Image: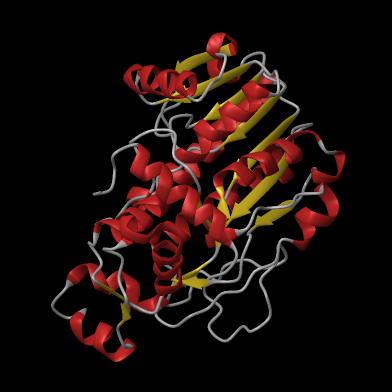
Amino acid sequence: MILVTGGSGHLGSRLILQLLERGHAVRTTVRTLARGDGLRAQLKAAGANTGALSIATADLSSDDGWAGAVDGCEFVHHVASPFPFGVPRHENDLIVPARDGTLRVVRAARNAGVKRVVLTSSFAAIGYGHKDRSAPFDETVWTDLTGDDVQPYIKSKALAERAAWDFIAADGGGLELAVINPVGIFGPVLGTDISTSIGIVRSLMNGRMPVVPRIAFGIVDVRDVADLHIRAMTAPEARGQRFLATASDSLTLLAVAQMLRRRLGRAARRTPRVEIPDWLVRGLAAVVPPLRSALPHIGRFRGATSAKAHDLLGWRPRDPEATIIDTAESLIRHGLVKR
């Protein structure tokens, strides 16, 4: 039995689908049974045999349910973590559930005799707080929490991953840990409950961003991140390792918009054509509050390498343009963008 926490999310649902396709028995946790019903329907629509799927309710903010969720499991994928669309009023609204929730899952896994936990961390735990770095980021680097670009979500991912490694070192017993650190996760959606990353493509397609700031990010396909989780689950070489997952150098919002327009024609007619100057973004942020969270990231290009995942696990991600187009086409199919 394999447990996937946060099964109703973009990555969690895709990971469950791949595990079921490979013949595994899967248990997943969701916050409410209604989410579980929706997840099962999505997986059936995607062609999965959901007879091998069981669903439990558990929340990162409570100990309730976790002992039962991990009972009888050989492996655990801890995917669940809060990822908001905006900056929270208090950073601990993100940090506490991410850190404490991770510790709840890892502790329950140890107590249940689980062999290995694969933790979904993030590039956020690697690539921030390093203002003048020119070399590509790799798994040896940790985010410097004192950096001016370290916002609550970034801090929550770094602290949660640190807490997991510290727990394994001090109290893990025989439990093994492997960590996946993806950049922005895109790729086709299974339903209408979309992630923050997917929301970027949706906003570009729907014309909600008539112009874009000079912001860049790495791209990786959700199908490839799920595959990397499965490789890290069983490979002996993955024990005690971090794996950075990226398929591209940093791409700007404008470059993504250009991909959409070039490949999708009329369906992408609302995508922006203009990148506004950095100085104008800074000026507008004084009167447009949502822009303020973007200021630390204006003009910063954070290169990263997945050489370790390639070399140790044989992982090969797909082309980022294909990922972006597949994302947009899935949003169209699900009626999430205007025609």
Question: Which residue is painted at 25% across and 67% down in the image?
Answer: 209
Residue 29's x, y, as percent? 48, 24
**Drawn side of residue 199 relative to residue 16, left or right:** left
Viewer-nearest residue: 266 or 69: 266
Tell me if residue 261 comes above or below residue 117 in the rendering.
below
Which residue is the extreme one toward the top?
51
* Horizontal side, residue 36 vs residue 322: left or right: left
Among the 4 quarters of the image, the one containing residue 212: bottom left
Q: Position of residue 111 (x, y in %)?
A: 66, 23
Which image quadrant for residue 310? bottom right
Quarter of the picture holding the N terminus:
top right
Residue 9: image location, x then y, percent: 44, 36
Q: Is residue 116 left or right of residue 335?
A: right
Q: Percent position (x, y) of residue 175? A: 74, 33
Can residue 215 be seen in this snapshot?
A: yes
Q: Nearer the viewer, residue 22 or 114?
A: 22
Q: What sort of colour scheme is used for the picture?
A: secondary structure
Q: Residue at x 63, y 59 (%)?
A: 246
The image shows residue 10, relative to residue 181, as above or below, that is: above
Q: Nearer the viewer, residue 143 or 233?
A: 233
Q: Is residue 280 left or right of residue 304?
A: left
| Residue 87 visible | no
> Residue drawn at (58%, 55%), measured in percent from left and top?
220
